[in-house]
Image (spheres, rainbow, N blue to C red):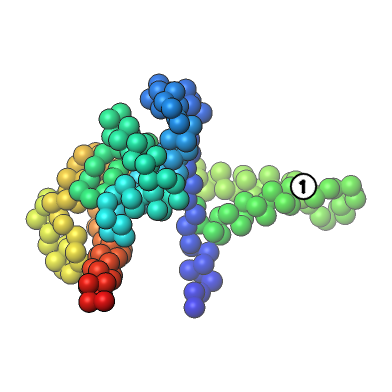
Amino acid sequence: MAHGNEINNKKYYWLKLDRHFFGNARIKKLRKLAGGDTYTIIYLKLLLLSIEFEGILVFEGIEETFEKEMALKIEEDEENVTITLNYLKMQGLLIEQGEDGYLPEAASSIGSETKSNVYKRNRNIAVGKIPTIVQPNSNQIPIEKEIEIEKDKDKEKEDVAEATPTSKKRFIKPSIKEISDYCSERNNNINPQRFFDFYESIGWKVGNKPMKDWKACVRTWEGREDYSTRSKVSKANSSKYDRED
């Protein structure tokens, strides 16, 4: 059973599309194709599918091919998905990373926040809508004033945080040996060379921000790799039983 803090710290992800998204020449060209509007929707669905993994479309081996699996996950026609994926590759909007796919536009447009922050924001919005018709007593502060005070406090905290020097070290790109040693220490299934090549190709960034902790990224990959392995084993076992039948 999840504790309160675990629930509050759960992250919600969203995709921030540039306001010129549909004005982009590559998107305009996609929409002009026969069935272009459908392909554009498929692209948007793929972007949403990838945001939890920093722009990566994870191939788990659920289906025989990457195209079939993406079609299954976003519930679209396989032929339409295949056409869309081929177009994205041709335009540099999809980069093959081993068995997975990487969407640069998603990586630079991902946002997230915890459940507790969502609650606080919605609560402030709700409080701000409460009418203040009744004149407050002299020892009471109007609700609008309370909100302003809270905003001022938050601004002060941000200013102090920016002005206070930190002791954080500058990020240093790890070597393949360091990655290999850490993966061995954690006894995971991550390919160190593949991990290095992936982040080397995107400038060692997480989303659109510079990477701060490569070991944390390794731990994030662990869950993805373990899930993918379990899916492939399950598929192999299913095929075995089919042959026995």
Q: Is residue 150 left or right of residue 231?
A: right
The residue nearer to you, when weighing 188 against 230, is 230
Q: Say if 114 sits above or below 188 in the image.
A: above
- Badge 1 crowding class, 10 Å Cα cut-off, few under 14, some 14 to 19, many 20 or more, is few
Q: Say if 88 sits above or below 153 in the image.
A: above
Q: Is residue 44 left or right of residue 216?
A: right
Tell me the quarter of the image containing the C terminus: bottom left
Give the residue type that dot 1 points to. Lys
Q: Which residue is mark 1?
A: 129
Residue at image position (85%, 48%) is 132
What residue occupies the far right of the structure in this picture? 134
Residue 69 visible here: yes
Whole-percent x and y of residue 69? 34, 53
Residue 110 visible here: no
Residue at image position (77%, 47%) is 129
Whole-percent x and y of residue 121? 62, 51
Q: Is residue 196 left or right of residue 126?
A: left
Label 1 residue SS: loop
What residue occupies the far left of the structure in this picture? 177
The residue nearer to you, when weighing 46 against 195, is 46
Q: How many marks?
A: 1
Residue at image position (14%, 66%) is 184
Residue 239, image quadrant: bottom left
The residue nearer to you, when weighing 27 against 240, is 240
